Image (cartoon, helix red, strand yellow):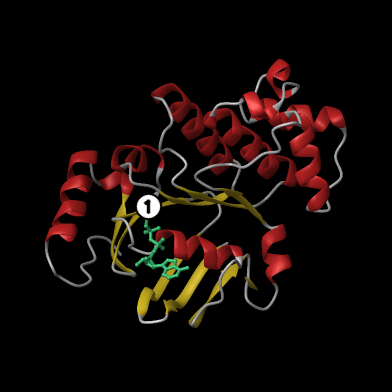
Amino acid sequence: MLEARNLSKSFGAVTALDGLNLGVREGEILCLLGANGAGKTTTINLFLGFLEPSAGEALVDGVAVHRDPAGARARLGYIPEQVALYPQLSGLENLDYFLRLAGVKATGAALLDALEAAGLERAAARRKAGTYSKGMRQKVGIGVALAKKAPVLLLDEPLSGLDPSAANGLCASLRRLRDKGCAILMATHDVFRAKEIGTRIGIMKGGRLVDRLEADTLDAREIERIYLSHMHDGAGAVMHVG
Ligand SMILES: Nc1ncnc2c1ncn2[C@@H]1O[C@H](COP(=O)(O)OP(=O)(O)OP(=O)(O)O)[C@@H](O)[C@H]1O
């Protein structure tokens, strides 16, 4: 559903992404770990069509993003680190607005169902979004993806700043989406949550994918040890699992 083929991006002299190859299938969660500046957000922005690749291509459900950004975006749900909502509108009205922008028609009942499935209670859905916590704003973002029936979900550091209960709730929503067949790519700094929900984990460094791990073959401490070994040595690509 998601594929990067030799995907590269430079900003002037800075190589943000250097020949990235990765794929995410239906029902998989790929978690990207990496230090600040490793290229995680650049990867997500290339899939979203917010950036043009310098070389290679990003594909969403077989659609090359740089050739058909609107077609690719129609298949995507996106949760940035801070979900921006219109503060004067309720969560329900925000959802309605974003879906109309995406050209998706849904009844009020379907919108409330999507928000409820994303974990936002009905009473809260009718409150102004200006009163929402970060976790509640993210639930509206998940609600958009659910109502759009987006087959692919991109998340950029969605866990940072969430309290443990909100983080648990988000992870539960992501697992449900995965079980329904959604392909999910998530950039995160949280090794332990990556182990908990990831099917696979990619470790990025200096714009390159330097390792790929199968999450269920390693425990969180081993993943952290491997991650730190990459951060602390100057070695190139080492593949622990296919
Ligand atoms: N618009 C831009 N102009 C110039 N350089 C950029 C731009 N966007 C990203 N970069 C550079 O590209 C590199 C990769 O940045 P990116 O934001 O993708 O990293 P990241 O892994 O998401 O980091 P973080 O964990 O801090 O979010 C960094 O060196 C960054 O400074």
Image coords of residue 228 (percent x, y):
17, 52
68, 129: nearer the viewer: 129
User: Element type at marker 1?
Assistant: strand
In the rendered view, tell whether residue 12 sits above or below residue 232.
below
Residue at 22 percent of width and 61 percent of height: 240
Residue at 66 percent of width and 44 percent of height: 145
Residue at the limit of the structure toward the top, as seen here: 123
Q: Label 1 sits on what residue type?
A: Arg
Classify residue 170 as left or right of residue 227.
right
Classify residue 178 as left or right of residue 102.
left
Image coords of residue 222 (percent x, y):
18, 45
* Disc 1 target residue: 200
Residue at 32 percent of width and 47 percent of height: 215
How crowded is the residue under tag 1: few (<14 C-alpha within 10 Å), some, or many (20+)? many
Image coords of residue 34 (percent x, y):
30, 56
> Where, quadrant-wise, is the N terminus in this rendering?
bottom right
Classify residue 88 as left or right of residue 232.
right
Rendering quadrant holding ligand 1:
bottom left
> Total number of numbered labels?
1
150, 10: nearer the viewer: 10
Image coords of residue 80 (percent x, y):
54, 48
> Where, quadrant-wise, is the C terminus in this rendering?
bottom left
Classify residue 10 as left or right of residue 207.
right
